[in-house]
Amino acid sequence: MTSTNSGNGAAKRVVAQVEADLRRLAQQRGEAHAALAAADRAATAAAILKFRGTKDAAAKVRDAKEQRGAAVDMLAELDAVEVDLQRELVEARATGDQLAREADAKAAKEFAAGLPNLFHECDRHLADFRRSYVTCQGAVREARAKRWSVPSEELMVSKMVRAIKTAFSVAELRALDMSPISSEERCTFASLGESYAAGVIGGAKQSLTPKPPPKPAAPSPAVPSPTSEAVRRRPSIHDTAAAAGQEVRVGRR
């Protein structure tokens, strides 16, 4: 990995150097074009002087031609240098790209080598969580069987599902096709355990308080039996006659 990085770094330095050379070459080309333009103006002025028969016109024409030739030679030389620099730049970039691809492939291979371990850890932690989850439920069910103060099965499962959802973000829950919960519903398994333990302790303390004895039941009201009432008072013949609207007369003997 180090050799690849060093090679890639060298290629990048070559690219940077060539790019700097090309910028300097462009500046020199601009100067050469300016010299060529100046030489052309000087040649035009010298031609006019020669036409007018000025004494030093021939020398001025010769100097202008030399200046122009030098500028043209400079431009030609710069063009050749630019061709070489462009070729060097292409090669340096190709070398850098190849080294970068090799470095990327090596990094991808190293990454892939460790990727299965990450997912194995996920399976391992899930298995550990399931064991702890089932153990917690079993403990609460055992306490419920002993009639200790713990929540119902439905409430226990609901709270534990909330604790699972609390560990994930809203986006993660939606990706898992699970409905998010509000901030008031969020809880942790630790908080549930502490709450259930406090409930068991509180219930145990209450069981130590003696309960008052039950009040005796009130006696049922006495209901007279029809037989005793009939025995107690039998209707006489006068009562029967009075009930029939008749009068009974008793004769003397």
Image (cartoon, rainbow, N blue to C red):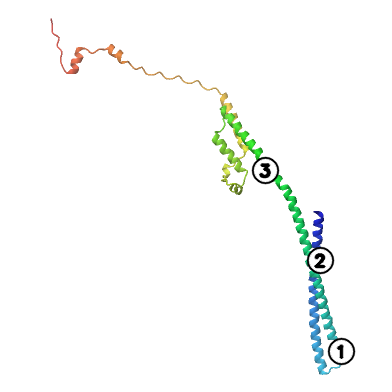
Quarter location, residue 18:
bottom right
Sequence-wise first label, 1 or 2: 2
The mark closer to the camera, 1 or 2, is 2
Q: In this rendering, would 37 be left or right of 161?
A: right
Labelled disc at residue 30: none
What is the distance, in whole Å, between disc 1 and disc 2 at their CAs?
A: 43 Å
Task: State the residue in front, 237 or 158.
Answer: 158
What is the distance, in whole Å, between disc 2 and disc 3 at their CAs?
A: 49 Å
From the image, tell me which residue sits under label 1.
59
Residue in view at x 30 percent, y 15 percent: 226
The mark closer to the camera, 1 or 3, is 3
Sequence-wise first label, 1 or 3: 1
Q: Residues within 10 Å of mark 2 (few under 14, many from 20)?
A: some
Residue in view at x 79 percent, y 67 percent: 89
From the image, tell me which residue sits under label 3.
122
Q: From what the image shows, is residue 205 above or below residue 97?
A: above
Residue in view at x 30 percent, y 13 percent: 227
**Mark 1 and mark 2 residues within 8 Å of each other at the beta carbon:** no
In this rendering, does residue 242 appear at all? yes
Q: Residues within 10 Å of mark 1 (few under 14, many from 20)?
A: few
Q: What amino acid is at disc 2?
A: Gln
The mark closer to the camera, 2 or 3, is 3
In this rendering, does residue 190 appear at all? no
From the image, tell me which residue sits under label 2.
17
- Residue 234 at x, y = what percent? 25, 12
- Residue 208 at x, y = what percent? 57, 24
Task: State the residue in front, 50 or 108.
Answer: 108
Q: What amino acid is at disc 1?
A: Ala
Helix, strand or loop for disc 2: helix
Task: State the residue in front, 73 or 250.
Answer: 73
Q: What amino acid is at disc 3?
A: Cys
Q: From what the image shows, is residue 150 above or below residue 162?
A: above
